[in-house]
Amino acid sequence: MRAKYVHTNLIAKDWRRLADFYQKVFGCVPVPPERNFSGKELEAGTGIPGARLQGRHLRLPGYDKDGPTLEIFQYSPEAERLPTGVNRPGYGHIAFSVENVEAARREVLQSGGRAVGEIVTLEVFGGAKVTWCYVTDPEGNVIELQSWSR
C-alpha cells in the first residue's frame, strides 16, 4: 500500500472559535469550502444516528496548497469530552516548530489556551537540543511547541 498524509481532525465545541485560534496563533490558512454535512450517508459513515457536522480545513503552516490540513469539525449530537491529558491513550497532540518557545507559549496563553507543563530543554542526539512545552488550545486539545538548536 502507498499512502500520503492528508489531515488531522479536531472535534470542537465551537468550530469557528477554534479555527480562528489556529489561524491567529499559528498562521493556518482556511481551505474552502466550509463543510456542512448531514443525512443518511453521514449517519452510516460515522455510526451516529442523526449526525450533523460543520467545520472547515486549515492548511498547516509551512506547506503549499497541496500540504496537509487541520480539519476542525463540530458535531451534533456532541459526545462527552474526556479530561485533557498528555498521557491519555489515543492521539496525544499536534506539534508546531516555532522560533521562540517562550514567546509562542505566551501568545497561546493570551489567545485562550492554557499551560500544561513547563518549558524544558532536552539534549537528544549528536549534541542537538530541543526546547519544548505542552499547552492547550482554548478547547483543551494538547499542542507541543518546539524549537531545535545545536
Image (cartoon, helix red, strand yellow):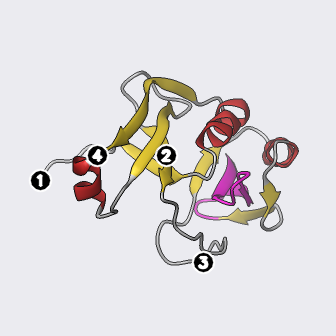
- Gap in Å between the C-alphas at discs 2 and 1? 28 Å
Q: Between tags 2 and 1, which lies in front?
A: 2
- Gap in Å between the C-alphas at discs 2 and 4? 16 Å
Residue at left offset 52%, top offset 34%: 60
Q: Position of residue 13 (x, y in %)?
A: 62, 53
- Gap in Å between the C-alphas at discs 4 and 1? 31 Å
Secondary structure of residue under mark 3 = loop
Q: Which residue is mark 4?
A: 39
Mark 2 or mark 4: name the one nearer the start of the chain: 4
Camera sees residue 108: yes
User: Callout 3 environment at 10 Å: few (<14), some (14 to 19), or many (20+)?
Assistant: few
Mark 4 or mark 1: name the one nearer the start of the chain: 1
Q: Are marks 3 and 2 in contact (CB under 8 Å)?
A: no
User: Callout 1 environment at 10 Å: few (<14), some (14 to 19), or many (20+)?
Assistant: few
Name the disc covering residue 73, or none: 2
Q: Is residue 24 left or right of residue 64?
A: right
Q: Between tags 2 and 4, which lies in front?
A: 4
Q: Which residue is mark 3?
A: 87
Mark 3 or mark 4: name the one nearer the start of the chain: 4
Q: Is residue 58 magenta?
A: no
Q: Position of residue 16 (x, y in %)?
A: 62, 36
Q: Position of residue 18 (x, y in %)?
A: 65, 43
Which of 144/100 is in front?
A: 144
Which stretch appears magenta? 124-150
